[in-house]
Image (tube, helix red, strand yellow):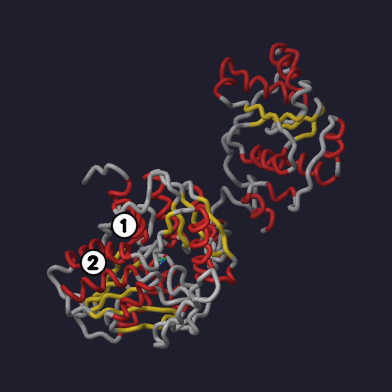
C-alpha cells in the first residue's frame, strides 16, 4: 500500500480481471476496470494529463478558469483535478447525457452549461470554444490534445504490457470517443506487442469509421468555425463513444493504420452485455463497457481456443441509473418479491401490524400539561408571537417531512423560522423534548413538524400541504402581511419520494 499526497496520485494502475462465466470455453476474456480510477472512469487519466501538460507548458495560469465540452466523464474527471489543484471549471454538456453526471460535476464545484441535444457533440464543442475565446479561459481540447493520447501510451498501455508480460495478447478491444485511449494504447501495442490485433467497436447504427467515409472538413467561411457532422452519424445509446465527427485523435489512429478490425455493436446487445457482466461476473460497468464487451464476446465466439482477449471497461454502471441501462430495473417490489415478503408473518405492507409481534414502542414524548412546565410554555409562546418571525416550524434537524416543508416554503418564497428541537443547544436541560411535550399539549398533535402562522396552529406537514391546496395557507399568510409565490408543481410532490411510491402502489 502507498500513502498518496493527493487524489491525483491514485489515478491509473487499474486492475485487469478474467471473466469466468461469460467467455466461451477455451477463450480467455479479460476486462480492464477503468471504474477503479478515483472518479470512476478512464477520463481521470486524461484530465490529469491535460491539466499537468498545460501547467508545464505555461498555458494555464494559477486561478485561470478551465473549460471543456464533455459528455460527462471528462467533466467529472476535470472537476476532480480542478478541485484538487484550485482551478475554477466550466463544463459544457449536451442536455441528453445522464443527470447523475451533471450533479456530480456540480457537487465537485464545477459549473455546467447545457447545450441543446439537437446541436449534438459538435455543438457543445463550438460552445466551449466560444466561451474560452470570449472569457480568456483555458480550453482542454480533449479531442485533439496530444496529452490525451500520450497519457494512455505512458500509463494504460504500460499497465497492459506489464500485466500480459508472460502471455500473448491476441486482441485488444476498445471503443473511441475522443480516440485518446485508442490511439495512445494502440501506438504502444503496435511497437511493443506486434501480435496484438486492435479491434475498435462502434454503434452499428452510426458506422462512422466502418463506412470509410472521410470526416468533412471544417468550413472556413463565417464564424464560428464548427466541426461538421459526419454523414453516417446517428444518435446512439453509447454515451462517451462515437461523437458526430471523427476526432483528430481517432483520425491519427486511422492514418497510422492502428485499427485492425471495426466491430459493429447493436445498442441492445450493449445494454444486455453490461447487465450480464453485472449478474454473472459481479462487475459493474457502464453502457460503453457493455458495448465493448459485446464486441469482445463476438470476437471470442469465432476465436481459436487459447486466444487471449482484453476488453476495456471505461466506467461504472452507477453513472447510468437514469438511462436505458436501468430502464427495466424496478424500484418497487415485483410479484416475486411481494410473494417473498408475504412468506413470513411480520413487517408486511398488506397486514399492517396485525399478525406482527408487538413492535417496540416508538419514542413517544410524554404529553406534559403546558402549565406544568411554565418556563418552556413561556418560551414557546414567545417564539409563536414574535412579530419579526410570523411563520414558525418546530422541526427535527434531519426529519424528511420537515425538509419537505422547508423546500415548499422556500419555493413559495415564504420566510420560515425553524426551531430544531433536537439541535445541540436545545438538548441542554432537555429543552427541545420539553418544548415538544408542551406543543403536544397545546395542539393535540404528537408529531413533528408543527407549523404556526401568526401564532395560529396550521398543523403538520400534510396539513400544510392541504392548506396550500385549499387556499387556507394563503389566507393565513395574508393575515400576517405575507403573500406566497405561485409554484408550478403540486405541493404533494415535495413529500419524501418513498411516500409517493407507497401511495401509488
Ligand atoms: N466510454 C465512456 C463512458 C467515455 O466517457 C469515454 C470518453 N469519452 C469513452 C468510452 C471513450 O474514451 P476515449 O475518449 O479515450 O476514446
In this picture, residue 150 sits left or right of residue 109: left
Q: Please provide percent x and percent y for residue 315.
A: 39, 62
Which residue is rendered at x = 53% and y = 69% of the image?
Answer: 224
- Which quarter is ligand 1 in? bottom left
How many residues crowd mark 1 within 10 Å: few (<14), some (14–19), many (20+)?
many
Q: Which mark is residue 452?
A: none
Q: Are marks 2 and 1 in contact (CB under 8 Å)?
A: no
Q: Earlier in the sequence, mark 2 or mark 1?
A: 1
How many residues crowd mark 2 within 10 Å: few (<14), some (14–19), many (20+)?
many
The outermost residue toward the front is 221
Q: Which mark is residue 49?
A: 1
Q: Secondary structure at mark 2?
A: helix
Between 194 and 300, which is closer to the camera in this rendering?
194
Which residue is rendered at x = 57% and y = 35% of the image?
Answer: 360
Height in image: 101 above or below 354? below
In this picture, residue 133 sits left or right of residue 373: left
Q: Please provide percent x and percent y for residue 342.
A: 57, 57
Which residue is rendered at x = 28% and y = 57% of the image?
Answer: 12
Q: Secondary structure at mark 1?
A: helix
Which residue is rendered at x = 85% and y = 34% of the image?
Answer: 476
Between 132 and 344, which is closer to the camera in this rendering?
132
Instruction: Say which residue label 2 marks.
Output: 157
Quarter of the image for residue 390 reads: top right
In this picture, residue 474 sits left or right of residue 489: right
Residue 290 appears in view: yes
Q: Please provide percent x and percent y for residue 260.
A: 28, 83
Amino acid at each position: 500500500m502507498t500513502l498518496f499526497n493527493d487524489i491525483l496520485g491514485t489515478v491509473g494502475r487499474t486492475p485487469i480481471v478474467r471473466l469466468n462465466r461469460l467467455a466461451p470455453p477455451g477463450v480467455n476474456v479479460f476486462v480492464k476496470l477503468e471504474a477503479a480510477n478515483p472518479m470512476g472512469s478512464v477520463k481521470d487519466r486524461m484530465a490529469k494529463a491535460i491539466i499537468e501538460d498545460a501547467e508545464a507548458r505555461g498555458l494555464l495560469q494559477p486561478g485561470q478558469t478551465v473549460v471543456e465540452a464533455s459528455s460527462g466523464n471528462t467533466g467529472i474527471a476535470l472537476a476532480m483535478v480542478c478541485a484538487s489543484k484550485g482551478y475554477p471549471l466550466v463544463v459544457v454538456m449536451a442536455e441528453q447525457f445522464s443527470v447523475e453526471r451533471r450533479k456530480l460535476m456540480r457537487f465537485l464545484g464545477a459549473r455546467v452549461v447545457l447545450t441543446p441535444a439537437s446541436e449534438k457533440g459538435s455543438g457543445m464543442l463550438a460552445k466551449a470554444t466560444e466561451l474560452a475565446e470570449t472569457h480568456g479561459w483555458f480550453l482542454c481540447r480533449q479531442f485533439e490534445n496530444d496529452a490525451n493520447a500520450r497519457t494512455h501510451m505512458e500509463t494504460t498501455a504500460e499497465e497492459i504490457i506489464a500485466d500480459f508480460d508472460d502471455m500473448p495478447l491476441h486482441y485488444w478491444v476498445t471503443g473511441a470517443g475522443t480516440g485518446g485511449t485508442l490511439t495512445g494504447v494502440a501506438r504502444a501495442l503496435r511497437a511493443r506487442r506486434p501480435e496484438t490485433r486492435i479491434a475498435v467497436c462502434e454503434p452499428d447504427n452510426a458506422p462512422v469509421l466502418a463506412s470509410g467515409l472521410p470526416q468533412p472538413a471544417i468550413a472556413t467561411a463565417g464564424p464560428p468555425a464548427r466541426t461538421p457532422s459526419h454523414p453516417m452519424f446517428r444518435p446512439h445509446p453509447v454515451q462517451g463513444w462515437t461523437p458526430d465527427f471523427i476526432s483528430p485523435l481517432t483520425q491519427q489512429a486511422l492514418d497510422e493504420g492502428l485499427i485492425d478490425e471495426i466491430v459493429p455493436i447493436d445498442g441492445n446487445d450493449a445494454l444486455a452485455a453490461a447487465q450480464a457482466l453485472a449478474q454473472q461476473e459481479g462487475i459493474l460497468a457502464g453502457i460503453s463497457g457493455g458495448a465493448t464487451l459485446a464486441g469482445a464476446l463476438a470476437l471470442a465466439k469465432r476465436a481459436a481456443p487459447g486466444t487471449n482477449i482484453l476488453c476495456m471497461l471505461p466506467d461504472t454502471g452507477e453513472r447510468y441509473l437514469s438511462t436505458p441501462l436501468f430502464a427495466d430495473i424496478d424500484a418497487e417490489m415485483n410479484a416475486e418479491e411481494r410473494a417473498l415478503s408475504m412468506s413470513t408473518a411480520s413487517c408486511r405492507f398488506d397486514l399492517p401490524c396485525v399478525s406482527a409481534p408487538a413492535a417496540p414502542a416508538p419514542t413517544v414524548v410524554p404529553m406534559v400539561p403546558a402549565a406544568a412546565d411554565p418556563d418552556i410554555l413561556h418560551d414557546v409562546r414567545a417564539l409563536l408571537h414574535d412579530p419579526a418571525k410570523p411563520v414558525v416550524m418546530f422541526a427535527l434537524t434531519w426529519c424528511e417531512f420537515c425538509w419537505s416543508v422547508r423546500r415548499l416554503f422556500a419555493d413559495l418564497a415564504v420566510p420560515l423560522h425553524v426551531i430544531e428541537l433536537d439541535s445541540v443547544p436545545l438538548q441542554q436541560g432537555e429543552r427541545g423534548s420539553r418544548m415538544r411535550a408542551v406543543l403536544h399539549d397545546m395542539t393535540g398533535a404528537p408529531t413533528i413538524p408543527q407549523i404556526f402562522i401568526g401564532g395560529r396552529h396550521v398543523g403538520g406537514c400534510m396539513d400544510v400541504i392541504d392548506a396550500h391546496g385549499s387556499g387556507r395557507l394563503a389566507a393565513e399568510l395574508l393575515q400576517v402581511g405575507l403573500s406566497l409565490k405561485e409554484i408550478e408543481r403540486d405541493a404533494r410532490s415535495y413529500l419524501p419520494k418513498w411516500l409517493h411510491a407507497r401511495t401509488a402502489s
